[in-house]
């Protein structure tokens, strides 16, 4: 059973950058979709960026051109490089791996962007 642990969150000023990392206790090979999601207070959890079948990358419109998702098979990690951060990016960011009915989530890491 795969477990996911996020790290790298923190407080940053608008325009700054953060790099989030998701470490998997086991291989994420075989999962159809891996990626990052976020949830702001009072809001539903939303997709930030995903990698499908290891080759297809998709970003939410709100982060295109600013965020970059990447995976490292050797290290079993999924990273999210966040540049040009905006206050509206403030949320708890969650790593996720999905295979059919199996949906694995990390504990989340807080990202706060001040103006």
Image (spheres, rainbow, N blue to C red):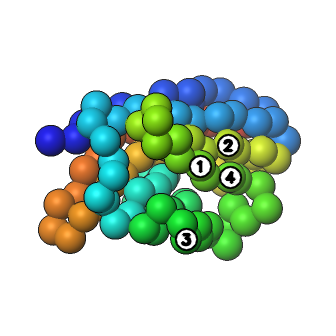
Instruction: Name the disc covering residue 56, or none.
Output: 3
Q: Position of residue 16 (x, y in %)?
A: 81, 36
Say which residue appears at 34% left-offset and 35% top-offset: 24
Q: Which residue is mark 2?
A: 81
Residue 32 vs 71, above or below: the answer is below
Nearer to the camera, 113 or 94: 94
3D distance between C-alphas at marks 1 and 4: 7 Å
Mark 4 crowdedness (10 Å alpha carbons): few <14, some 14-19, many ≥20: some
C-alpha span from label 2 to label 4: 5 Å
Name which of mark 2 and mark 4 comes first in the sequence.
Answer: 4
Q: In terms of image quadrants, where is residue 31?
A: bottom left
Q: Do labels 1 and 2 touch, CB within 8 Å?
A: yes
Q: Depth check: 8 or 14 in front?
A: 8
Cα separation, mark 1 vs mark 3, equals 11 Å
Q: Of the two numbered discs 3 and 2 on the same chain, state the one appearing first in sequence.
A: 3
Between discs 1 and 2, the one toward the N terminus:
1
Label 3: which secondary element: strand
Left or right: residue 90 compared with residue 1: right
Examine the rendering and report whether any part of residue 44 can be seen. no
- Residue beneath label 4, please? 68
Q: CA distance from mark 3 to mark 4?
A: 13 Å
Give the SS element for disc 4. Answer: strand
Q: Nearer the viewer, mark 3 or mark 4?
A: 3
Residue 63, percent from left and from top: 69, 61
| Location of residue 98 with respect to 40 vertically, above or below | below
């Amino acid at each position: 059973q795969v477990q996911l642990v996020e790290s790298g969150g923190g407080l940053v000023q608008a325009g700054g950058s953060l790099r989030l990392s998701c470490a998997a206790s086991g291989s994420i090979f075989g999962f159809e979709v891996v990626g990052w999601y976020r949830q702001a207070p009072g809001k539903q959890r939303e997709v930030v960026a995903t990698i499908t079948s290891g080759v297809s990358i998709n970003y939410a419109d709100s982060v295109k051109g600013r965020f970059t998702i990447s995976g490292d098979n050797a290290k079993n990690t999924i990273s999210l490089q966040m540049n040009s951060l905006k206050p509206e990016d403030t949320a708890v960011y969650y790593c996720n791996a999905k295979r059919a009915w199996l949906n694995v989530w990390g504990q989340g890491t807080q990202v706060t962007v001040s103006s």
